[in-house]
Amino acid sequence: MVKTNASKYWHFRYTYQGRAARMSLGVYPHISLQEARERAAECRNLLKQGTNPGAKRRDDKLR
């Protein structure tokens, strides 16, 4: 995603319990395409396990 101020972000779009959501995977070019793909794969694995990756990230930050 490219913002109006020309900053670029990797995002992961997903649906959890019927609701669309989006989470940031990092800032380009600090995060490479390969690393963004790895992070997206981790998020997909969490979804397969029935876990909301966005909620998990928030919980991890609180700990």
Image (cartoon, rainbow, N blue to C red):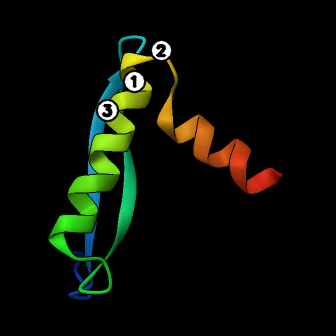
Q: Position of residue 24 (x, y in %)?
A: 39, 58
Q: Residues within 10 Å of mark 1 (few under 14, many from 20)?
A: some
Say the numbered circle drawn on residue 50.
2
What amino acid is labelled 3 in the image? Answer: Arg
Determine which quarter of the picture holds residue 13: top left
Instruction: Name the N-terminal-most of marks 2 and 3.
Output: 3
Number of marks: 3
Determine which quarter of the picture holds residue 2: bottom left
What amino acid is labelled 1 in the image? Answer: Leu
Q: Position of residue 44 (x, y in %)?
A: 31, 32
Q: What residue is shown with label 1?
A: 47
Which quarter of the rendered picture does the N terminus lie within?
Answer: bottom left
Residue at x 47%, y 14% (from the top left corner) = 50
Q: Which type of secondary structure does the marked residue at label 2 adopt?
A: loop
Q: Which type of secondary structure does the marked residue at label 3 adopt?
A: helix
Q: What residue is shown with label 3?
A: 44
Q: Residues within 10 Å of mark 2 (few under 14, many from 20)?
A: few
Question: Is residue 17 left or right of 4 when viewed as pictured?
Answer: right
Residues at badges 3 and 1 in contact (C-beta under 8 Å)? yes
What amino acid is labelled 2 in the image? Answer: Gly
Question: Of residues 63 and 1, which is closer to you in this image?
Answer: 63
